[in-house]
Amino acid sequence: MVFPFSRRPHYADPSSEAAKETPGGFIKSLAILAILAWLLRSLIVAPFSIPSGSMLPTMMIGDYLFVSKWPYGYSSASFPFEFPSFKGRVFGSTPERGDIVVFEGPEGADVVKRVIGLPGDTVAVSGGQLALNGKLVQRVRIEDYLMPVSPNSPCRVVPPAVAMTRPMEDGSQGCVYPAYRETLPGGRSYVVLDQTDAGPADNFEPVTVPQGALFVMGDNRDDSLDSRYRVEAGGMGFVPIDRVVGRAERAFWSTDGGASWFNPLSWFSALRTDRIATDYHP
């Protein structure tokens, strides 16, 4: 019995010209992928890793996070290799106090800090306590922060503070840091570390943030070279808003530094699972 619509299946001949990918087509595909990756990284989101403990306890060394590009608009700093290069900011808006921003530092490397002062604000520090526009910012002592000591996170303190450790629940050692909950005008709240009241920037004379700039600080107040330090001294000084790359969002990976490229199993044993999806919004 023959079905009127039955036909023998047709298979393309792999040797035919239609089945072959030309070098030009392959290059075109790579170019499209490269453009899409550039658009994603430039306009929407980019990865960033935490290289230091200046933002403890909010961010740990070894955190990998997403940085959103759209909240403050776009400048040349938003784009890889600053291409295209242009002055000013497109669709620009000013960050809010308390935002954690990634910006291009004076030496060209990306840096992460918390926004404390906006254009026109007066910022000062007295005995380690922050003051904004002539008023002390609310700060409440809370339970000590216990940081797990690991290959990439040693128990680092700033003199005259003395390193202190104590056992954690899993038997490992934790580094003890005095912690405070700080609340900015408007209600945004987060935890800061204050190792000593005699640190080099615990007393900072009032300064007024110029237009088009930000005053930023690290949450690990005694171990952060931020806007309290001049650029010549290795600090950030006032950060031009046009140098802001984006806003820190969430962690997608975190490692304690114990992984080896040659041992894939160590990638997972060094993983800090409790840090994944950490939200960096205050």
Image (tube, helix red, strand yellow):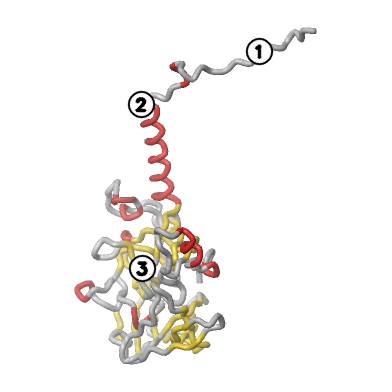
Precedes in sequence: disc 2 or disc 3: 2
In the structure shown, which secondary structural element does the residue marked by tag 2 occupy?
helix
Q: Does residue 262 appear in this view?
A: yes
Q: Does residue 249 appear in this view?
A: no
On residue 236, the disc is: none
In the structure shown, which secondary structural element does the residue marked by tag 1 occupy?
loop
Q: Within the image, what quadrant is residue 26 found in?
A: top left
The residue at 68%/11% (across/down) is 7
Dot 3 crowding, Cα within 10 Å, few <14, some 14–19, many 20+:
some
Residue 45, how many percent across, how many down?
44, 53
In this picture, residue 271 sits left or right of residue 160? right
Closer-to-camera residue (213/41): 41
Residue located beneath label 1 in the image: 8
For badge 3, the amino acid type reads: Pro
Compute the Cα span from label 2 to label 1.
34 Å
Dot 1 crowding, Cα within 10 Å, few <14, some 14–19, many 20+:
few
The residue at 47%/64% (across/down) is 266
Contact between marks 2 and 1 (CB within 8 A): the answer is no
For badge 1, the amino acid type reads: Arg
Precedes in sequence: disc 2 or disc 1: 1
In the structure shown, which secondary structural element does the residue marked by tag 3 occupy?
loop
Precedes in sequence: disc 1 or disc 3: 1
Residue located beneath label 2 in the image: 24
Q: Within the image, what quadrant is residue 32 found in?
A: top left
The label nearer to you, 1 versus 3, is 1
Compute the Cα span from label 1 to label 3.
63 Å
- Most distant residue in the left direction: 232
Residue located beneath label 3 in the image: 51
